[in-house]
Image (tube, helix red, strand yellow):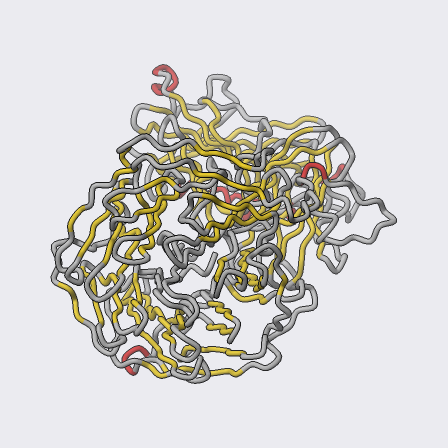
Amino acid sequence: MQSKFTLLFVIGILLPALPGCGLLRPATPWPATSTVSDTSTPHLTTEAPALPATPSATDTVIPPSATEEVVPQITSLQMIDAKDGWAWTNSGQLLRTADGGQTWTDRTPGASVGPEGSYYPDSQTAWQPVYLQSINISGLLHTTDGGQTWTQLSYGPPNSGGEPAVLHFTDARNGWAVNEEGAAGSAYYTPSETHDGGATWTVLPVIPPVPESNLPPGTVHLCGLCEDSFYYDPGRMIIVQGDMLTMQPGGSVRMQVSFDLGKTWLSQNLPLPKTEAGALVAPSQPIFFDGKKGLLPVHLVKMNSDQTFAYQHLAFYRTQDGGASWSLLPDVLDQVLAEPPAQIVSPNAEDIFVVCGKALCASHDGGQTWQAVASNLDFTQTDTRSVSMLDFLDANLGWVVIQGHDNYTLYKTVDGGRTWTEIPLHIVSSAPVITHIDTSLPTPTQIPNPTSLGTPTPEIAFDPNTNATRIRFAPGMTWAEIYDTISANEPMRYVLSAMQGQIMSVSIPEGSAFSLAVAGADQKSLSDPRSQHPFWRGALPSTQDYIITVQSQVRAPFTLRVAINPPGQATQNFTFTDPKYGGLLTYTDEFAPTDAVAPIDPKGTPLITLSFIDPTFYFPTTNLNEAYLVLTATQDPATVSTCTQPSANGIDILTGQVTTQHFTFTRTESTSAAAGNLYDQISNRAVIGNECVEVIFLIHSTNTGNYPPGTVVPFNRAVLLNKFEEVLNDYFAKY
């Protein structure tokens, strides 16, 4: 996840020994500060993608493509020269061209791979990360003949299950990689190196500016939500801090540089442009063209009071001494979105292209001055249209991929972006691709899947690295859902890291057979050991690992949702979309979907049941047993005609109307009691379109007289009802 603001720079030369190198990857949008996610879409973050198992045979032959088969759609590409280049399609194919993109041959290796982390220094050579499902680890594919044959190496750069490590090689044997893992608003970087062509990798002993005892050796911990950036090559390590978490201007570009793997750090405060003194800083990684010369792109943002952008600018800083000092270039680009498609053309780094507003902006003096290119192609980016890839070889020759409504179109220019011509894309037949498994390397020990982890005995000291499954959020995400199976009365443990003050919530929807316990790595329990709830929510007391223990009375599959709000953010929102009726129910992480059947008397069919999960409201400290919000709907004509009337059984009473920001609901209430239990149902009903919509609040509490005096206090009903009312107020239907 290299931060949410990483310019899509494709560089011709990174270091003198790296001619033609470039990172092949698609542009991604800049996530909003508060995450809003559809609960119907699971986020699987503890397991690697399901890929084909490693072939048992030494050589695997891929059948040739059909002659003149039209390419599905190219989503990203990297041209090496005017004729040779590599590209990826939206169907997962790796393609190679030798005629400037007029025709392509399929060079997909015998495994499902993607462009992330790949390294293509020339037309014949490539290193490609791959997940080896049969042994549950990351491996590496390598070709030296343009993808005709690939060698599969059993080891890849260190990777803990997140995005592939980003690869770089200086020659056939020597290279390095940077692995990035995201968790709860943090970003963790681990550089490693190889000296045998990628066959083995060693984590580098880098020392972060602020060492943390609980981190693995060689790991640098930064603030992902701040938009901090991290750069490593064998000559230097650079950290640039961002302002995008606090949303408070820092007044400068704050940088730390080390030339000795972190033994010593040089801190710098680079001045902002005079007209941008109040801007928020969102830096990208610096780009180096040799051992001394480099550029640092910095996105400068100012927000209006309504959280819209007052402006988005792009500034460049230049170094001539390898990063020890930097100077601000005079011209600042306007109307530049976060993560704009852009390119610095090497070897002289004089030619730079950036998408700015509707135009393509170009500099031919190393960023000193800029001009908008008068072009026949519209570079406007909207919610449904974007520039997926920009790839220039020099001041005149370039390619661009435009995405619109899930379609990708490839264009080419020979006059510096003034005139673009669409290129018809075809795959032509070729000799079969062969993947050779390097049997000279020892086979790695298989890593067990989460479901096969043994349960630690009480005599074993708890170690989150060996006794638990580590949860890692997907890039840009602040929550995850994990699917697993548990045996009866055999605890399963999960671990993740988070920062002091963040709000974490965990929940299991599958029912009362499950219970959760939450504790810190410091062995201090956060959840009440007396409670048996399948949920927990609370503020985290310190920056450390946190362990979630799941227990069940029966063997059963389950879903564990874990959400950690960005620092300083009290809640985050989720949205349920009703696929049948089109209603949208937005709720905070104070609620979680549950399979429990709420004891309600509904008029419609229940669509989603939410459980209120703040344990401070519940027994054993208060008399609250359970609290649910249930959305129901029906298009039955008889029910629609009597929707806003009290139920036919006559137990609920009309109490008035409630006007939300979208609709007016009729409210009824009913109360029933039995054996010291009180069930309070508040129904909010409205005819919306041609259906009866009902949002029900159900509160089940117990008479405090059932408990020893002083042990249980009444729950705060007013605060709880206010939580329910906020969800009702946001309900929306697409009519």
User: Going by the image, does 535 lie left or right of 104?
Assistant: right
In the rendered image, which quarter is residue 182 located in? bottom right
Q: Position of residue 183 (x, y in %)?
A: 56, 55
Residue 722 visible, this angle: no
Q: Residue at x 60, y 36 (%)?
A: 483
In the rendered image, which quarter is residue 498 located in? bottom right
Nearest to the observer: residue 674 or residue 235: 235
Nearest to the observer: residue 305 or residue 83: 83
Residue 115 visible, this angle: yes
Nearest to the observer: residue 257 or residue 427: 427
User: Going by the image, does 236 lie left or right of 264?
Assistant: left
Q: Position of residue 657 (x, y in %)?
A: 38, 36
Figure check: 375 above or below 532: below
User: Going by the image, does 356 lie left or right of 418?
Assistant: right
Q: Position of residue 80 (x, y in %)?
A: 32, 57
If the image is split into quadrants, where does the C terminus sit?
Answer: top left
Nearest to the observer: residue 524 or residue 314: 314
Q: Position of residue 243 (x, y in %)?
A: 43, 70
Q: Which residue is at the far top?
A: 638
Figure check: 706 above or below 444: above
Q: Which residue is at the far right?
A: 459
Q: Residue at x 32, y 35 (%)?
A: 429
* Number of marks: 0
